Amino acid sequence: MDNPSSVTTTLDAVAFDVDTSDGGRRRILHPLTLSLSEHRVAVIGANGSGKSTLLRLIAGLVAPTSGSLQLSPSGVRPGFIFANPQAQLIMPVVGEDIAFSLRRSIGSAAQRRRRSREILDTMGLGDREDSSIYELSSGERQKVALAGVLAAEPELVLADEPTTLLDLRSTVEFTELLMGLAAPMVVATHDLALAAMAERVLVFDHGRLVQDGPPATAIPHYRDLSGAG
């Protein structure tokens, strides 16, 4: 996307339950009402706190058990980045994977290949177009996954712990790529340095939103909550 766009995500009493092995139900996300319109929103909290569930709800990967969720303007196309790039890399060759994401928007195979090369160049992976995805480092795979998402020109990017499997250098490089995106983004992360770059930070604990504010107040709240303050 060439220009920053504005997307508002509105949740009205949204809750999410899952079935348990004993035939019961467990609440993963307690009723949540809020509106997100900032360009960069970070979601932090312990494992199992509801971060990933929130992102999957916004992406439409799961439906709320109750309540309603709306993206505005209507027809917004979200793109989802998983923690493990293997979850979204489909084709065995780097260039082919990007071209696969372009199949709906570009009819010509030659044009898809050309556009794929352009996108990879922006990721610093222009020389990896004909490489097997299995030859790549974790950082390179995550960049290819991001390239595939961007090929579909999403109007909202949702990133679920995208730096979890990366070493320090790859984390720094990938964070720079994320923060340089024109599209608005909601990122769930354990990386507090990444969260500190957001305009707004949501803190979750046991499926409940317990703090909502700028990084300067939300991150210390999370540190206190986790006993690391």
Image (spheres, helix red, strand yellow):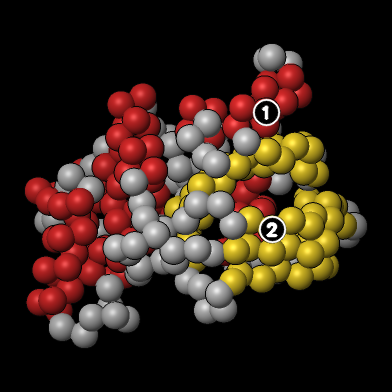
Provide residue 33's location: percent of width, then percent of height: 79, 57
Q: Image quadrant of residue 37?
A: bottom right
Provide residue 113's location: percent of width, then percent of height: 14, 69
Return the mark for residue 74. Answer: none
Q: Nearer the viewer, residue 62 or 189?
A: 189
Q: Image quadrant of residue 22?
A: bottom right
The answer for how far apart the CA atoms under marks 2 and 1 are is: 19 Å
Q: Residues within 10 Å of mark 2 (few under 14, many from 20)?
A: some
Tag 2 residue: 35
**Is residue 105 something that shows in the picture?**
yes
Marks 2 and 1, the one that precedes in the sequence? 2
Q: Nearer the viewer, residue 191 or 135?
A: 191
Location of the C terminus (image quadrant): top right
Q: Residue at x 14, y 55 (%)?
A: 129
**Residue 169 as seen in the image, left or right of residue 199:** left
Q: Residue at x 76, y 24 (%)?
A: 225
**Residue 36 as seen in the image, left or right of residue 31:** left
Relative to 196, residue 75 above or below: below
Q: Amino acid at mark 2?
A: Ser
Q: Residues within 10 Å of mark 1 (few under 14, many from 20)?
A: few
Q: Residue at x 56, y 52 (%)?
A: 38
Q: Nearer the viewer, residue 3 or 120?
A: 3
Q: Secondary structure at mark 1?
A: helix
Furthest-bottom residue in this view: 107
Tag 1 residue: 217
Provide residue 68's location: percent of width, then percent of height: 76, 70
**Is residue 188 something that shows in the picture?**
no
Q: Nearer the viewer, residue 201 or 168?
A: 201
Q: Residue at x 60, y 32 (%)?
A: 215
Relative to 105, residue 197 above or below: above
